[in-house]
Image (spheres, coloured by chain):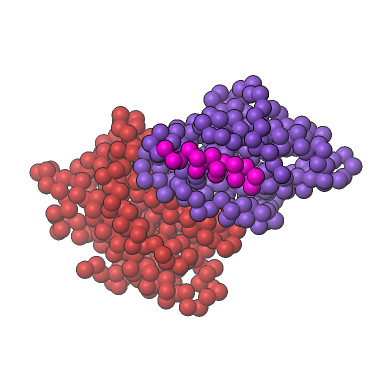
Chain colours: A red, B purple
Amino acid sequence: MIRTGRRRPAAPRGRRGAEPRVERIALGDLRPDPDALLGRLAYLKLALFESASAVAGRATDLGDREVITRVAAAVLEQHTALTAMIEARGGESAAAMHPFTADVDRYRRRLADSGWHESVLTLHLSAGLLDDFFAGLAAGLPAPEGPRVVELLQRDIGHDALVAVLQAGLGTDKRLGSRLALWGRRLVGDTLLVARAALADVRDAEGRPASTEERRIEPVLNGLIAAHTRRMDRLGLTA
Amino acid sequence: MIRTGRRRPAAPRGRRGAEPRVERIALGDLRPDPDALLGRLAYLKLALFESASAVAGRATDLGDREVITRVAAAVLEQHTALTAMIEARGGESAAAMHPFTADVDRYRRRLADSGWHESVLTLHLSAGLLDDFFAGLAAGLPAPEGPRVVELLQRDIGHDALVAVLQAGLGTDKRLGSRLALWGRRLVGDTLLVARAALADVRDAEGRPASTEERRIEPVLNGLIAAHTRRMDRLGLTA
């Protein structure tokens, strides 16, 4: 059971300015498998890109559509950079991504068929949480991939613009707030499952999957939830 | 009535190598309206990008999905470059695109709900024909936009990769050939309507819309149809 209701003190603001980042995840002594991490992340970004394009296409306002297309473009750049890394390591991107399609597709299906603003919120919260998580995990990868992936995930995909779109919606539709609050609470559980699934590819110094070490993983997940709560707060939504 | 059945002698191969290009359209003495051309083209590229992402998302093979995602990325780059040009002229991209959404959306709707291979063929043929047409039209724009738009539209968005995906499908499904031939014939008529619509924004030296000058437009459209026929031929499809 994931607790989303407990508020935590705000962390120092991160390098992205307006978008506060979670404190660096203490997974540095774990050993993520580079091929698995790159393949999983590349597929996640492909899926997020497709979702973002679909959200853009469903926008009724052409300005919103432009804003979200830019987010899609930024996510696509991340995907492309990841597949380039896979290929630079001698891998083949489709083969590298393949083992992770089922998990990610299930996640997408669970979050599909929502209203348009819910989908925009998904982009904002899901990308925010997963970028934080995978940046922490990638910090444990050796160079050159490790630092490159961290840098890639810390790039701003346009969160401020997504927040502005959501705030405009919240300003004109009084009932949207409670719908989005509900959606954000539902979303965080599903998104944390995606993060947890990635821990299966991470081993500790004794070679055990990190996913079995609940005690050490708990603070990591709490950090992600705290950042999620701050994103909800910024929108005036109860997490 | 558009004749698609008549074969024409092959034109010299263009600079893109494997993809033959139509001979330069003789629209150089016409005067396209820069704002209208940029706005229309930016929206067309946005729509084509969304279609390409959707086609990628519907691919059952992850390798095909990668290929088509790259095409989507290339089209998105064209869209982004066009909106940057609109903004550099002091315009606002959503406002610039707005007058052209109805025409383009109608075109998309007419070509929606097809099989997956039909949608791949649409990407290949529609982008091929419209890039040829608008490159010819943009050649009549003053610098800096004119040469930039021409260069942008002559970039290869990945036609060879789309042809390879189609050929793989044609090789395994014997009935696909006749379905795609039919689709290609239907597609060309709708796509030429999109090209013709753009002529409403183009005036001749006397200020008359170019769309009223059937006699001068006819050779242009014939050149586009010839290039379309060569694309169909390359796939072994009867145009």
Asked where in the image residue A225 lies, by quadrant, the reply is bottom left
In the image shown, does A41 or B203 lie closer to the viewer?
Answer: B203
For the point 82% across and 34% down, the residue is B29
Q: Residue A9: horizontal and vertical position, in percent?
A: 32, 67
Extreme residue toward the bottom, this view = A174
The reply, left or right, for residue B101 in relation to residue A144 is right
Extreme residue toward the left, this view = A206
Is residue B19 visible in the rendered image? The answer is yes
The reply, left or right, for residue B150 in relation to residue A6 is right
Q: Does residue B84 lie above or below A216 as drawn?
A: above
Extreme residue toward the right, this view = B206
Q: Residue B44: horizontal and vertical position, in percent?
A: 62, 47
Is residue B78 visible in the rendered image? The answer is no
Q: Is residue B179 magenta?
A: yes
The reply, left or right, for residue A217 in relation to residue B115 is left
Q: Does residue B212 lie above or below A7 as drawn?
A: above
Q: How many marks?
A: 0
Q: Is residue B68 magenta?
A: no
For the point 29% across and 43% down, the residue is A98
Q: Does residue B71 lie above or below A133 as drawn?
A: above
For the point 61% across and 35% down, the residue is B228
Question: Which corner quadrant holds the C terminus of chain B?
Answer: top right
In the image shown, does B85 or B71 lie closer to the viewer?
Answer: B71
Asked where in the image residue A35 lies, by quadrant, the reply is top left
Q: Residue B24: horizontal and vertical position, in percent?
A: 71, 29
Range covered by the magenta-colored residues: B174-191
Question: Which corner quadrant holds the N terminus of chain B?
Answer: top right
Asked where in the image residue A119 lies, by quadrant, the reply is bottom left
Main SS category, magenta section: helix
Q: Residue A26: horizontal and vertical position, in percent?
A: 23, 51
In the image shown, does B67 or A80 lie closer to the viewer?
Answer: B67
Q: Does residue A195 lie above or below B213 as drawn?
A: below
